[in-house]
Image (cartoon, rainbow, N blue to C red):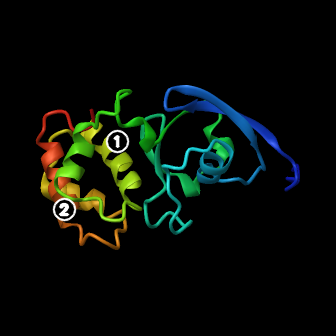
Amino acid sequence: MRRVNPDERAKIAFWLNGRRVSGEAEPRMLLTDFLRHVLGATGTHVGCEHGICGSCTVLIDGVAQRGCLTLAAQAEERAVTTVESLAGADGALNALQTAFQKHHALQCGFCTPGILMSFTDYFARNPNASEADIRAVLGGHLCRCTGYAGIVEALVEASRSGNPAA
């Protein structure tokens, strides 16, 4: 078995929000740290660093994953999607973002990127989710500001929009 040298750096390349990126990382660098500190993509937040709060949620090959539980090397040659990709090229918000804005579901905004990414994945697979389903998925995210009422209202409205993940 090969021992990992913590000072060793590996080149990592993947697709970030549709564009090819690369950089170097230590073997145990987390994807969140690689995104933020190597690539400068700071929309993905780091809260608990234990996979509990959900703030670090990104999509890897279209599936919601906790970035703080994923090594940067695990993203090699995969498609990583972050909150920075949700708005259109012209800055226009998508249906999910618009609903968050309308229902004041943002507050401090720390948990928002992770919630948006989780529901981008969830609504892609379940476009007409019930409020109970939405609450169950939302249970994987911690929000300290909103009391969740506006977030649930926004997610229910987005689900009923006909194309919530677009």
Report the side of 9 relative to 38 (left or right). Answer: right
Residue 109 appears at what percent x and percent y?
A: 37, 60
Q: Quadrant of residue 28?
A: bottom right
Quadrant for residue 98, please give it: top left
Residue type at numbered disc 1: Asp
Mark 1 or mark 2: name the one nearer the start of the chain. Answer: 1
Residue 96 horizontal side relative to residue 86, left or right: left
Q: Nearer the viewer, residue 149 or 69?
A: 149
Question: Foreground: 162 or 38?
Answer: 38
Residue 136 lies, with reference to residue 2, above or below; the image says below
Secondary structure of residue under mark 2: helix
Provide the residue designation for mark 2.
150
Question: Is label 1 or label 2 in front?
Answer: 2
In the rendering, at what x and y percent does residue 39 appear?
A: 64, 41
Residue 71: x percent and y percent? Answer: 65, 50
Image quarter in which the C terminus is found: top left
- Left or right: where 117 falls relative to 129: right
Tell me what residue is drawn at x 44 percent, y 59 percent: 55
How far apart marks 1 and 2 lie (CA) works out to: 20 Å
Of the residues shown, which amino acid type is indicated by label 2? Answer: Gly
SS of the residue under disc 1: helix
Residue at the image position 50 percent from the left and 57 percent from the top: 45
Q: Report the residue marked by disc 1.
A: 121
The mark found on residue 41 in the picture is none
